[in-house]
Image (cartoon, rainbow, N blue to C red):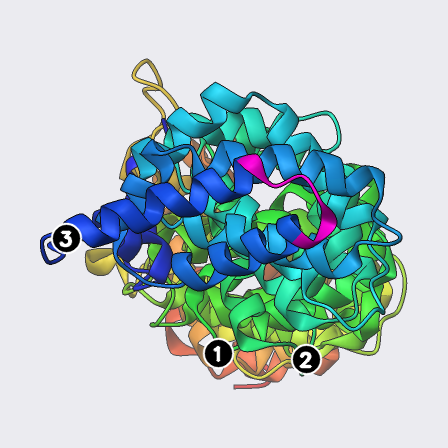
């Protein structure tokens, strides 16, 4: 059975298909004359032998069956109308070159009489057998699509009427010639009406899960449906039924469709996302892209296709308010699939604003948590760019890292710190890191816990992980910040900028031991104190940064206390005192 989501979505289609299947028909009472007339018409068809008699009988049948009274159609079927027409159709098909007009009238009469109740349709096919479906297919493919007749339209319409019966859906679509005939009508027939009827049939047939499986595994037919839904200027009825068919597929559990990564298909998917026909086409397009990007070999192609348009499309869908939540989550996960180490630089060069968009997603508490998690995973890939090779969008990376460092989320800060630490390992990156507005201040704020009361604790990795509490996270952050700063001060050109950051000097003063006893104790056990002292000594020994240290009262007070027991610190203090 189709899942609940698919059923709910399908009910939203106010289409003739579902309306026809649900409506309660209350026709007027059938008169004796109408019953007799139906019986006589069928009798005339059965006893017709000559070409003239057959032509007259079929003409009368079309005239008599041309009404909308389901009960009368049922009477016609009970009198054997469909069987009589089928037999004549078999005969005419053997002489179709000379009886083209009769052929058109025969399939027209079938398309009229099969407007009977769904149960009568099923019983009729059961009585006649699969040969009825076979000969209708034969009529479709053997009729010249350019001839001035509606033969193909009537034949396809008859199949569409039969496809509305639940019990006939699998036999019709399971017919060995179905896929070939359906593809022929959708791609080779120039007239709109037959193509609309064919797509209408597919929409009806794919209300059945087994038929959905058939369609999604037929790449040629599936591509024809997608193209019909996406093609601009296409008949609106055709687009509507193709959209319904695609939505049926999108709702399949564990969906895996047979999709080629052809430019034509990808163009069609782009069109589907840009239509206002319904959200169903958007849902299918996202499902299709999700499947395609699950394959590693497709990701670079899709990321670069049409100047990276899928990056923009998926990012927009993920935050749209008129799209179902499940579709938005799939869009974001698809975008995450595309943004990998092999594509990050390519994507940033085409869409440098994508990093800002992802950052805003991560910061937006109104978005679904799965969307934010996928956005963060994508950010991790992008901000690794520029570590080794120079990139033109490096400031965008630093801006993103700065936002992560200032986040209330311990996870965000962890991502920002670990990535910044790797960037600082490369000396060529350090000047831009130091000079980026607010970067040193953000690091200092982490050291002195200016936002400690607002922070979230890092999620524990397992129930047995005793190191996942807030204090451990704070210590890890502090050690990482100090590691970053130690990397930066090893380059003399960075020291003045670091020393000019007053809040950073204040943070260092807070980390230094308060007296000589604490200093001796911390020399062995406290990495933060040792690192902060190393930082201080590096800054205090450099003429470009000494002046700023000397003017910082808290630091000088701490240095004075430490100078009593450490000769090297005493010498540093003496040099600094000359600048006070």
The N terminus lies in which quarter of the figure?
Answer: top left
**Displayed quadrant of residue 426:** bottom right
Give the percent coordinates (x, y) of residue 26: 10, 54
Instruction: For label 3, count other residues whose C-alpha is less than 10 Å away and answer few (under 14), some (14-19) or many (20+).
Output: few
Give the percent coordinates (x, y) of residue 174: 62, 25
In reply to whether residue 365 is colored magenta, the answer given is: no
In reply to whether residue 48 is colored magenta, the answer given is: yes
Q: Secondary structure at mark 1?
A: loop
According to the picture, the residue beneath numbered tag 3 turns out to be 31
**Displayed quadrant of residue 357:** bottom right
Please tell me whether residue 77 is drawn above or below residue 366 in the rendered image. above
Seen at 43% across and 65% down, the residue is 279
What label sits on residue 168 in the rendered view?
none
Left or right position of 369 against 540:
left
Please tell me whether residue 462 is drawn above or below residue 227 in the rendered image. above
Seen at 34% across and 56% down, the residue is 325
According to the picture, the residue beneath numbered tag 1 turns out to be 276
Q: Earlier in the sequence, mark 1 or mark 2?
A: 2
Left or right position of 325 against 426:
left
Give the percent coordinates (x, y) of residue 389: 90, 62
Q: CA distance from mark 1 to mark 3?
A: 48 Å
Q: CA distance from mark 1 to mark 2?
A: 12 Å
Towards the viewer: 400 or 204: 204
Seen at 40% across and 63% down, the residue is 66
Left or right position of 12 against 44:
left
Towards the viewer: 378 or 140: 140
According to the picture, the residue beneath numbered tag 2 turns out to be 232
Q: Secondary structure at mark 2?
A: loop
**Magenta stretch in the rendered image:** 47-52
- 1 or 3: mark nearer the eye: 3
């Amino acid at each position: 059975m189709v899942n609940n989501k698919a059923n709910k979505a399908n009910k939203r289609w106010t289409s003739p298909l579902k309306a026809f299947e649900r409506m309660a028909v209350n026709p007027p009472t059938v008169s004796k004359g109408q019953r007799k007339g139906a019986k006589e018409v069928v009798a005339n068809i059965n006893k017709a032998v000559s070409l003239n008699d057959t032509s007259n009988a079929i003409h009368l049948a079309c005239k008599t069956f041309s009404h909308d009274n389901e009960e009368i159609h049922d009477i016609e079927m009970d009198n054997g109308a469909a069987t009589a027409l089928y037999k004549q159709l078999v005969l005419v098909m053997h002489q179709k070159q000379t009886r083209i007009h009769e052929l058109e009238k025969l399939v027209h009469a079938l398309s009229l009489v099969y407007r009977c109740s769904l149960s009568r349709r099923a019983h009729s096919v059961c009585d006649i057998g699969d040969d009825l479906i076979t000969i209708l297919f034969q009529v479709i493919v053997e009729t010249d699509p350019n001839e001035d007749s509606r033969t193909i339209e009537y034949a396809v319409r008859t199949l569409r009427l039969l496809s509305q019966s639940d019990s006939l859906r699998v036999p019709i679509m399971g017919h060995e010639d179905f896929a070939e005939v359906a593809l022929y009508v959708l791609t080779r027939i120039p007239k709109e009406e037959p193509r609309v009827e064919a797509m209408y049939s597919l929409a009806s047939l794919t209300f059945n899960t087994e038929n959905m499986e058939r369609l999604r595994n037929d790449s040629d037919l599936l591509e024809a449906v997608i193209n019909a839904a996406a093609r601009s200027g296409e008949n609106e009825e055709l687009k509507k039924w193709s959209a319904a068919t695609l939505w049926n597929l999108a709702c399949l559990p564990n969906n895996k469709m047979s999709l080629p990564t052809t430019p034509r298909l990808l163009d069609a998917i782009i069109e589907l996302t840009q239509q206002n026909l319904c959200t169903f086409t958007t849902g299918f397009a996202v499902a299709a892209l999700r499947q395609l990007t699950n394959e590693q070999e497709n990701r670079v192609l899709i990321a670069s296709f049409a100047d990276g348009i899928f990056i923009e499309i998926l990012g927009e869908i993920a935050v749209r308010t008129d799209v179902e939540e499940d579709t938005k989550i799939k869009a974001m996960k698809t975008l995450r699939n595309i943004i990998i180490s092999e594509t990050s630089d390519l994507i940033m060069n085409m869409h440098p604003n994508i990093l800002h968009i992802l950052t805003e997603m991560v910061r937006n508490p109104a978005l679904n948590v799965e969307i934010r998690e996928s956005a963060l995973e994508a950010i991790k890939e992008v901000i690794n760019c520029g570590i080794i090779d120079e990139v033109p969008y490096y400031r965008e990376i630093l801006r993103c890292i700065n936002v992560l460092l200032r986040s209330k989320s311990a996870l965000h800060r962890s991502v920002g710190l670990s990535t910044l630490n790797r960037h600082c390992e490369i000396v060529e990156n350090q000047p831009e890191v130091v000079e980026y507005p607010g970067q040193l201040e953000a690091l200092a704020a982490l050291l002195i816990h200016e936002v400690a009361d607002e922070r979230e604790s890092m999620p524990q990795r397992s129930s047995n992980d005793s190191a996942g509490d807030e204090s451990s996270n704070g210590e890890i952050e502090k050690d990482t910040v100090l590691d970053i700063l130690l990397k930066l001060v090893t380059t003399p050109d960075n020291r003045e900028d670091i020393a000019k950051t007053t809040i950073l000097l204040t943070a260092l003063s807070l980390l230094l031991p308060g007296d000589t006893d604490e200093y001796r104790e911390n020399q062995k056990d406290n990495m933060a104190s040792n690192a902060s002292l190393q930082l201080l000594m590096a800054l205090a020994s450099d003429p470009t940064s000494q002046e700023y240290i000397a003017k910082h009262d808290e630091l000088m007070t701490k240095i004075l206390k430490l100078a009593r027991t450490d000769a090297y610190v005493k010498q540093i203090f003496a040099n600094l005192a000359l600048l006070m």
